[in-house]
Amino acid sequence: MYAHREILTIDDPQTLVLSKPLPLRKNQRIEIVILADEEDTELENLRDVIAVRGITESDVEDAITWARSKP
């Protein structure tokens, strides 16, 4: 039996992108078990606020770079 464990963040609920290929052959039968962490409602609310304001990942990276450059 082969087991693979990887923690992912889902961008598209119809597609899972693994960090590396699995050592499986074409037409091999497999069983997939998906366990989802419960979302923190405060974190979800924060994500919603960020989305509404149009803040991008690049904006966050720029803010971090700016904050780290300050003494």
Image (cartoon, helix red, strand yellow):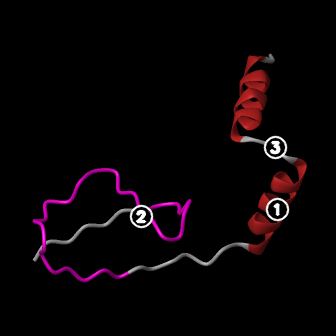
Mark 3: which secondary structure?
A: loop
- The residue at which mark 1 appears reads as 48
State the quadrant of the C terminus.
top right
Q: Are marks 2 and 3 in contact (CB under 8 Å)?
A: no
Provide the residue designation for mark 2. 16
Q: Is residue 57 above or below residue 66?
A: below
In front here: 20 or 65?
20
Q: Does label 2 or label 3 sit earlier along the sequence?
A: 2
- Spatial distance from mark 2 to mark 1, Cα to Cα? 23 Å
Query: Which residue type carries mark 3?
Result: Ile
Q: Is residue 67 left or right of residue 58?
A: right
- Residue 24 forms part of the magenta stretch: yes
67 left or right of 25?
right
Residue 21 drawn at (x, y percent): 23, 54
Residue 51 quadrant:
bottom right
The disc labelled 2 sits on which kind of residue?
A: Leu
Tell me the chief SS of the magenta region: loop
Q: Is residue 11 magenta?
A: yes
- Earlier-in-chain disc, 3 versus 1: 1
| Place of residue 59 in the rendered image (x, y in percent of width and height, measured from the top left) | 77, 34
Q: Secondary structure at mark 2?
A: loop
Q: Which residue is located at x 45 percent, y 80 percent? A: 35
Q: Residue at x 70, y 33 (%)?
A: 58
Point out the residue furthest to the front here: 27
- Segment tinted magenta in the rendering: 7-33
Residue 68, given in percent of the width and then of the height, sits at 73, 23
Q: Which mark is residue 55?
A: 3
Mark 2 and mark 1 lie on one chain; the one further toward the N terminus is 2
